[in-house]
Image (cartoon, rainbow, N blue to C red):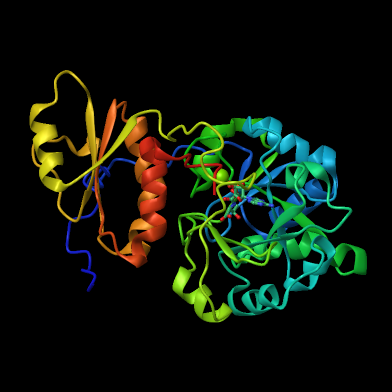
Amino acid sequence: MQEETNVGPDFPSEPALAPAAATAPAALPPPEPPHIVAASDEAIARAAALLRDGEVVAFPTETVYGLGADAANADAVAKIFKLKGRPADHPVIVHMASADALDRFAREVPESARRLARAFWPGPLTLVLKRAPDVPDVVTGGQDTVGLRVPSHPVAHALLAAFCGSGEEQRLAGVAAPSANKFGRVSPTTAEHVGADFGASVALILDGGAATVGIESTIVDLSSDTPRLLRPGAVPTAAIEQTLGGTLALPDTQAPRAPGRHASHYAPRAQVKLMTRREMLETVGSHKGRRVAALALEVPVPRLPPALQRVVPVVAGKYAHELYAALRALDASGADVILVEQPPQTASWAAVNDRLRRAAGRGNLDDEP
Ligand code: TXA
Ligand code: MG
């Protein structure tokens, strides 16, 4: 299907810039909380030192922001679970500076994993492999597998390089990091989102601007003979299948990490409902007493205040980039229900549609792949 380009207006709810009066001083942006720090070389070095000291720091990746700790330090990783309010049996992904550290964290690495690593790392792909014996249980959720990824974001890369250092032992270090949101909430795509969820309880939040991809990595499980897609993401399924020279199976529903094992709960506080544009317009016109917000494709919804709607492009990559910020903003508007105009159902929209289904409560947006 030919994707349309964004011909719609910009977000109508963003305040227009007020024309500067000749005498009025320029309005200053509100001060940032002191723990959100621009990702300068100095701040990255400080973050790496905190990681070495067993502290938790938040950092940008190309997908979403991560909440990181030294993957070899079980106490440090346990702090992440406490901060997130995440159940202990949910594994976290280990972020590595390069594929050189694959064999440090995984055992029996199949050729297919090396092929995918060569093709897609650094980048938004996570490989689930059999874990090396000394990977802490807290990282793997007590399973025999570990999720590994080499992110491409320059700040994530610089942080990993600074943390990993140059000595052989350091070079093989890794940072365990789930998305930097409270358990079950919308993943963060900006440093401010992380700040909103955690306040000053995270020692340092490195600000590297808005995440470019905007939704979490594609997860492929290569820990058994059957390669499986555990979570669709920015790396398209077809590209992975082409590199593997075979098809990807769906998650094994009997396996411990399969979706649906834990009760689903949708991420925003407001209820999320997926619908056609016509249904959306009818609902906006007929809602009774409920505060309704809308996430519309390309064209604003008439008779709905700008603060209660976001207009997103019908281009899968751009939509993904804006989705979580839009859901967070609409949730913060105090809406009881967020009406989401259903995007196309084509392959390029698979990851976006997966997240929308989870947000609508038919899966857990945060912690089931
Ligand atoms: O893009 C991403 O992957 C982001 C950035 C920060 O890298 N991270 C992320 O982490 O989304 P998290 O923890 O929010 O989601 C990771 C998913 C979870 O659903 C977890 O169950 C799954 O990966 N996972 C991690 N290790 C696994 C393993 N050994 N087996 C199966 N699933 C695993
Ligand atoms: Mg998450």
Q: Is residue 336 visible?
A: yes
| Residue 269 point in image, percent of width and height | 40, 28
| Residue 239 point in image, percent of width and height | 48, 76
359 relative position to 226: left or right:
left
- Position of residue 146 relative to residue 308, above or below, is below
183 relative position to 283: left or right:
right
| Residue 287 point in image, percent of width and height | 14, 25
Query: How many circles with numbers are drawn on the protein?
Result: 0
- Position of residue 267 relative to residue 127, above or below, is above
Closer-to-camera residue (199/37): 199
Q: If the image is split into quadrants, where does the N terminus sit?
A: bottom left
Residue 350 found in image quarter: bottom left
- Position of residue 318 relative to residue 121, above or below, is above
40 relative position to 168: left or right:
left
Residue 21 found in image quarter: top left
The residue at the point 77 percent across, 70 percent down is: 109
| Residue 104 point in image, percent of width and height | 84, 64
- Position of residue 31 relative to residue 175, above or below, is above
Closer-to-camera residue (349/31): 349
Q: Is residue 21 visible?
A: no
Closer-to-camera residue (161/93): 93
70 relative position to 192: left or right:
right
The residue at the point 45 percent across, 74 percent down is: 238
Closer-to-camera residue (124/248): 248
